[in-house]
Image (cartoon, helix red, strand yellow):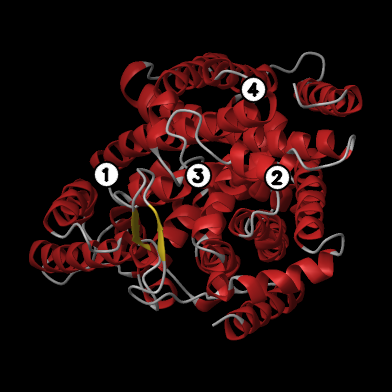
Amino acid sequence: MLLEPLDLAVFIGYCLLIIGMGIFVSREKKGHVKNSSDYFLASKALPWWAVGASLIASNISAEQFIGMSGSGFALGLAISTYEWMAAVTLLVVAIFFLPIYFKKGIYTMPGFLLDRYDTRVRTTMAIFWLLLYVFVNLTSVLYLGALSLNTILNVPMGYGIFGLALFAMVYSIYGGLKAVAWTDVIQVVFLIAGGLATTYIALQMVGSGDAWEGLGLLRREVPGHFSMILSRGEMMIPDGSGGTRDAYLDLPGISVLVGGMWITNLSYWGFNQYITQRALAAKSLDEAQKGMIFAGFLKLLMPLIVVIPGIAAFVIVKNGIDVGFIESMKDPVTGLIKSDRAYPTLLQLLPVGLKGLAFAALTAAIVSSLASMANSTSTIFTMDIYNKYIGKGASEAKQVKVGRITALVAFGVASVVAPALGELDQAFQFIQEYTGFISPGVFAIFFFGVFWKKTTSNAALTGAALSIPLSVVLKIVFPDLPFIDRMGIVFLILAALMIVISLVEGKGKDHPNSIEINKDLFSTSSTFKIGAVLIAGITAALYIVFW
């Protein structure tokens, strides 16, 4: 075991704090029985700072700490485009989509599709999201979290997966979103403080005791790792099997700015249940929008926490700075350097006490995302599947019970599937690619549903049904086509089909469920406007500096 008694004390203290907080906020006033609004939307009482903190804690997980650090090791700063563009995407969602969601008073994203289209579209997308959350999101976070436990503490993968699932279940299944959101406020403090500590120590190691010198040395030693826009053939990265492949396939040049990256970002931040659910639980639209601004500023900070350590690990390996470090980077089965082992290996370098804090930060990121994903899975199943087809007219108490059982089942299934991801070199890219099979369809039906009144239900159903088949066909026929570009092409095909179907079927008339939009709907506060200008300006400056 690599954690000293002080580290273990810090970590155990963190675990007890989170569990205690989760149980404390889950209490109900005497005589009040927890209803669906309490369980699934935290009683719609979250202030802006809790919304923003919960958004980041739900988003920043093992896929960022471990997966994105692994991509930083292999790809460099270019992987930060997911974080920096997300900051701008949050502004778009806050201005153009949140006002509509609040106006509709929805609980779930499929619920919005029911209101705009019909039951078929709602049910189809609900099933897609359930499969995605359980078999891609929950599974990958459990795997990456267990990988960190295996690297740091030598905990067998199976025990690590079970332990993390159990930890997340202990405080989240009973309390619902209220427990998840309020514990996220604590989690985000741990993950930022511990993450920055890890970055500082990694840079100190590279810079022979001087972190600032270490940062400068990174740019001098591996300038290619500080290029935000990659060209074809510019960088070859490990393929996980001892060979290499072109990094352009993961981040295809200018497409990350003007192409498919917008589809994956808007689908994630605007139409993703376990993200939008935090905003829907805010006290008001203004509080939700301010929360998005807060989350946007935190997203700008994330590459310093999750990407720079990966680049530092690459320099340590490249320059042979530490033999023990290099050995720890190797997969115990294949003996190959494994990119996703970069962050867990860096944690071993931290001094006593700080290691416990950093390990708590990593665990905070993991369990908060697990809890969020499971809660949103239970929300969609209960509100959009159970209430519609299985338990029509179910009482509030029954709905809460079904939600808890669903979360439990989701954890169980994901725990069984998670070990299968062990063959991957960069799990972060796995998540992005396979989420991208559904993202073009999601983006198309929401975008046209909100902004084009003529979009029909059959057109939306076509977009939902064809997103995965078209993505699979293009992946098979054009295996060298970057998946971000593939998402863009699939979206354009779906958009064309939806436009034709809507015009032919609707004969030029507006759909009866179309949304009335006026400029007053998109008005924002002065505070939001100032924050939005700052985020947009900082993001533009970062791309100019690292172009």
94 on left or right of 218: left
Residue count near mark 3 (Cα–Cα under 10 Å), binned few <14, some 14–19, many ≥20 = many
Amino acid identity at mark 3: Ile
**Residue 116, percent across and down?**
34, 52
Give the CA distance from mark 1 to mark 2. Answer: 46 Å
Q: Which mark is residue 346?
A: 2
Quadrant in the picture for the N terminus? top right
Point out the tag, 1 or 3, that comes first from the N-terminus: 1
Q: Nearer the viewer, mark 1 or mark 2?
A: 2
When the figure is inspected, residue 532 is found, relative to residue 421, above or below; the finding is: below
Q: Which mark is residue 180?
A: none
**Residue 111, percent across and down?**
41, 42
- Which residue occupies 40% across, 66% down? 251
Quadrant in the picture for the C terminus? bottom right
Q: Which mark is residue 337?
A: 3
Q: Does dot 1 land on a helix, a strand or a loop?
A: helix
63 on left or right of 54: left
Q: Which mark is residue 154?
A: 4
Point out the tag, 1 or 2, that comes first from the N-terminus: 1
Seen from the viewer's position, the closer of residues 305 and 105 is: 305
Give the CA distance from mark 1 to mark 4. Answer: 46 Å
Q: How many marks?
A: 4
Amino acid identity at mark 4: Asn
Give the CA distance from mark 2 to mark 3. Answer: 14 Å
Amino acid identity at mark 2: Leu
